[in-house]
Image (cartoon, helix red, strand yellow):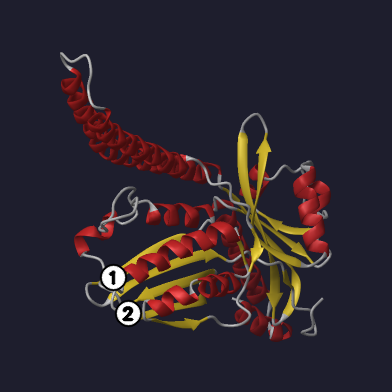
Amino acid sequence: MRRFLQKALDKIDKMDRGRIHSLLCNIASEIDLLEMVLDSMTDGVVVTNRQHRIIVFNKSSERMLPFNKAELSEKIVWEVIRDREISLFFKDNLENQDSVIDKEFTLNNGFLKTLSLSIMPLVREGRIQGNVIHIEDVTEKRAREERLRRAESLAALTTLAAGVAHEIKNPLASIGIHLQLIEKKMEGKRRIYTDYINDFISIIKEEVDRLNRIVVDFLFAVRPINTVLEEGDLNRVVRELLEFLKFELEEEGIEVVIDLPDHIPKIRLDEKYMKQALLNIIKNAISAMPDGGTLRIETLCRGGELHLRISDTGVGIQEKNMAKIFEPYFTTKDFGSGLGLTLVYKIVKEHMGDISVSSKQEKGTTFDLSFPIPQKEKRLIGYEGEAM
């Protein structure tokens, strides 16, 4: 359409009245179509010029944003916004020429509404002509996510409770049996040897301690983790942990291969809990390589996320167990609580991340942890190609 108009304008001096009328009708038709498309969108769109005055807006933007004037055209955008927080957001970022993606605000106009706002440069031929503001109502989306989190939490709690019930059953049975044996020893006797009874009491004490550990592990698994997320270098966390495990890895005959590129973006993390999660994964890798092997750790950026991959050349995980490895109290070892990977999963989720596992028996296992890279405010490109 733009090329067609340019050609028409180049020849307008040679056009007769009828052809000019036809051209204007075509332009009007195209404009009507664009307005119809904009007004049919469920998301709001506001376009401003270089002076931050509104030049285009659709009906959804009027419905979602708290405008305080009926006439919006040619008004400075932040001066017609009734909500102070949103008004300051537009003023600060538009004047500083910053791009922002998905900044959320909660409005209360009798009912709560969550809006996601984005500011992007409006560019033509390398020159900035203004800004495009995108508005999305994410109220229902956030509500669905919250319902899903609750459902996942309830399902996890149900699985955890079933695991606890199973774990408690054995020590309780042992305690009951030894109390019955003590009772039989005492039956009909006014005096008994304490040595015999002390053996039973010792076993009962061990089982009580075991029950206590189960309860402590259960509480640790269900209580929220008080993570304090601060901007940090994941590569540095990995290097510090490997230095801590250096001698253990050497004694087990495990070669460590790292690929940690310089200048990876920082992410928001809690170093203490992150080290705990990585320690649990590496400990599992060590157990999977009883005769030695190779531990490979690498970080890479992909699609707005920072990935941390930890691979071993161990025995691998049986396919039938793959779906269970993050379940509480599931373990294939002869020792351990079965909560190690449950804790890893929980910590990764607290960091707004995700975790996936791939494994082949006798070839090894790879854990892929992904974390969101915080969106940085981007400087816009100036008219002459320089940062403004």
Query: Could you tell me residue 111's position as x and y percent?
Result: 62, 31
Residue 359's label in the rendered image is 1
Vertical side of 121 occupied by 387: above or below: below
Query: Could you tell me residue 377's position as x and y percent?
Result: 71, 67
Residue 292's label in the rendered image is 2
Q: Earlier in the sequence, mark 2 or mark 1?
A: 2
Residue 73 visible in image: no
Vertical side of 263 occupied by 50: above or below: above
Q: Residue at x 22, y 22 (%)?
A: 192
Q: Nearer the viewer, residue 50 or 4?
A: 50
Instruction: Look at the numbered disc 1 and give the secondary structure of its residue.
Output: strand
- Position of the N terminus, as image quadrant, is bottom right
Q: Horizontal placement of 24 versus 381: left or right?
A: left
Query: Could you tell me residue 26's position as x and y percent?
Result: 60, 69
Q: Nearer the viewer, residue 1 or 168?
A: 168
Please name the amino acid that badge 2 sits on. Gly
Query: CA gap, disc 2 to disc 1?
Result: 18 Å
Q: Quadrant of residue 52?
A: bottom right
- Position of the C terminus, as image quadrant, is bottom right
Q: Quadrant of residue 183?
A: top left
Q: How many marks?
A: 2
Vertical side of 109 occupied by 47: above or below: below
Q: Horizontal placement of 158 versus 125: left or right?
A: left
Q: Residue at x 59, y 56 (%)?
A: 38
Q: Nearer the viewer, residue 273 or 70?
A: 273
Q: Horizontal placement of 6 versus 357: left or right?
A: right
Q: Nearer the viewer, residue 347 or 291?
A: 291
Query: Could you tell me residue 213's position as x and y percent?
Result: 39, 41
Residue 342's label in the rendered image is none
